[in-house]
Image: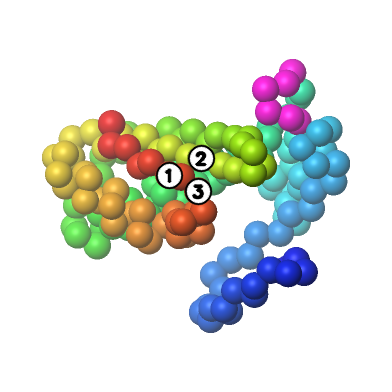
Amino acid sequence: MTQVGQARPTPRTGKVVYTAKTRTAGGREHGASRSSDGRLDIRLSIPGTAGLGTNPEQLFAAGWSACFESAVALAARERNIHLPADVAIDAEVDLTLSDDGYFLRARLYVSLPGIERDVAQSLLDEAHQICPYSKATRGNVDVAINLV
């Protein structure tokens, strides 16, 4: 949905592979989110508080790191590179406040043990080009992809 005064993005066409459907009520302060299939059913709370739930930044970090790991695997598969079973991604998403309002910053720390550093870095570069989360944040979020 486009807000009044915003430019409408050019529609992209393609085959829909999956549509995630959720309903959230109560927002990040005492809210809850549930997926239409019931697989996701979580409580929300404000970041940094003693609330019982998670927050949108944690959900975004989990989603992006999972998607990015799949993009690394796809890049490796296309190049016939076998990835180790212990690939891991640590994601950090900052909710930041400036004079202009709130914005996000993000860092992904990717571990590809046993893969030569230059090969691993090229896989990360390729994954960053094909990952839908990376595409969605490009130009909108300050992002650092780090090989560890």
Whether tag 3 and tag 1 are in contact, CB under 8 A, the answer is yes
Q: Disc 2 to disc 1, how far (Cα)?
A: 6 Å
Residue identified by numbered label 1:
143
Image position of 89 (left or right of 58): left
Q: How is the image coloured?
A: rainbow
Q: Nearer the viewer, residue 116 or 57?
A: 57
Give the mark count.
Answer: 3
Image position of 60 (left or right of 86): right
Q: Quadrant of the N terminus?
A: bottom right
Q: Is residue 70 above or below residue 99?
A: below
> Which quadrant of the view contains residue 87?
top left
Residue identified by numbered label 2:
105
- Identify the element where label 3 is drawn: loop
Q: Is residue 12 above or below residue 29?
A: below
Mark 1 Cα shell of 10 Å, populated few (<14), some (14-19), many (≥20):
some
Mark 2 Cα shell of 10 Å, populated few (<14), some (14-19), many (≥20):
some
Residue 102 rendering spot, x and y as whole percentages: 65, 41
Magenta residues, as a range? 45-50
Residue 48's disc number: none
- Identify the element where label 1 is drawn: strand
Q: Amino acid at mark 2?
A: Arg
Does 1 appear in magenta? no
Q: Earlier in the sequence, mark 3 or mark 2?
A: 2
Q: Disc 3 to disc 1, how far (Cα)?
A: 6 Å
Q: Amino acid at mark 1?
A: Val
> Which quadrant of the view contains residue 46?
top right
Q: Earlier in the sequence, mark 2 or mark 1?
A: 2
Residue 112 rendering spot, x and y as whole percentages: 26, 37
Residue at 21%, 44% in the rendered image: 120
